[in-house]
Amino acid sequence: MRALLKWWRAPLWTLALATGAKSFVDNPILGSERLNRRGLHVARLKLAHRLAWARRRRLARGVPAEWRRQFDRQGFVEVRDFLPPEAFAPIQSALLTREFDSREHQQGDTLTRRVAIGPALLREVPQLRSMFRSRRWRSLLAYIGSTRAEPLYYVQTIVTGRADGGPDPQLELHADTFHPSLKAWLFLTDVSDDQGPLTYVEGSHLLTPQRLAWEQARSVNVRHSDRLSQRGSMRIAPDELRGLGLPPPRRFAVPANTLVAIDTSGFHARGSSERPTVRVEIWAYSRRTPFVPWTGLDLLSVQPLAIRRAQWLTGIVDRLDRLGLMKQHWRPAGRRRPNEP
């Protein structure tokens, strides 16, 4: 009887096929072994990537050719000295020396703290507002994310080795979701190779025949996979990369004022760290519904709504958590300087 009652949600599960829904366990249609054996997951994957590259072609004009070539081939763009020193220094000083109301989330022995960037902070740090409005910033992030939708912005701190916990799941190579999306880091502190740097598998954003075969096999047998893969963030073991024609992950040990922007449908992870470390960055995130042909038409990207979304999102999830409708993983951490351990 319980199994029959849950099927009243079948129309919603069906509609979710046309969205960015990715969890194989929360949607029996997405997780159907029979349908995935017949190619459901791979069909969604191929359509989402085809539309993303079509949108990128329309967004390419504003992006320097060197950056486009780097991204198209590798799945990421790395730009050292992204800002002129006279623009970067005030941003770095303002964000590292002041206290902000922070939120914190623990995964394994790693703490991630975030400060949602909103209008008040941009008034205090006008150089940051100028960067977000600059053509080179906006055009690059739009191209990689394949959308003009405004990203969410945070000041983010990664603290490794200072909390009790098991293995950090972010150390496992994974793709965030089945369709192209954006994450970007402008590092405010130097990141050495032993400070848990970002890692990325070059070329893993491309749908090669080997990648499609791997996705097909994983979708059919997903019920035997780990929990995060079942929820649509596919994990891959390092020794599987060669079979997909992929190189080992690249570790981004970079100086401050380096921008790294990636397509998170490619395999990436937080690098291992041999000691307690702290790194700080401006972090941007954009993931839009993949099955649309247009690059804009996002009402939430209209100012003054866009820059308030990160703060609003925290408050909305807090309310849903109090109502028992959603789990709030980001807990208040008090007023902290981002570079504090």
Image (cartoon, rainbow, N blue to C red):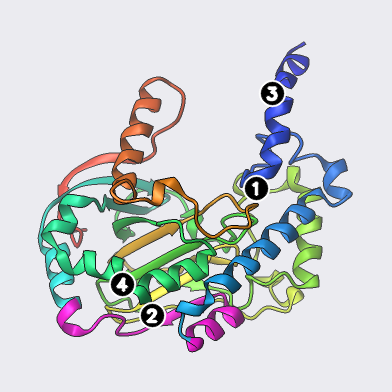
**Which residue, given by chain and number where applicable, does mark 2 sit on?**
253
Question: Do the CB atoms of the residues marked 1 and 2 lie less than 8 Å apart?
Answer: no
Q: CA distance from mark 3 to mark 1?
A: 25 Å
Please state, as top left, top right, bottom left or bottom right, where the N terminus lies in the image.
Answer: top right
Is 76 on the left-hand or right-hand side of 184? Answer: right
Q: CA distance from mark 3 to mark 4?
A: 44 Å
Crowding at mark 3 (Cα within 10 Å: few <14, some 14-19, many 20+): few
The residue drawn where x is 70% and y is 48% is 225
Q: CA distance from mark 2 to mark 3?
A: 47 Å
Q: CA distance from mark 1 to mark 4?
A: 41 Å
Q: Is residue 199 above or below residue 36?
A: below
Q: Earlier in the sequence, mark 3 or mark 4?
A: 3
Question: Circle 3 — which element?
Answer: helix
Q: Earlier in the sequence, mark 2 or mark 4?
A: 4
Q: Foreground mark, 2 or 4?
A: 4
Nearest to the observer: residue 196 or residue 28: 28
113 magenta-colored: no
**Which residue, given by chain and number where applicable, does mark 3 sit on?**
9
Q: Foreground mark, 3 or 1?
A: 3
The span shown in magenta is: 65-87
**Which residue, given by chain and number where applicable, does mark 4 sit on?**
134
Question: Circle 4 — which element?
Answer: loop
Is 172 on the left-hand or right-hand side of 278? Answer: right
**Which residue, given by chain and number where applicable, does mark 1 sit on?**
226
Q: Indicate the position of residue 65 as horizontal and vertical percent values.
A: 50, 87
The amino acid on which the numbered mark 3 sits, given as a three-letter code, is Arg
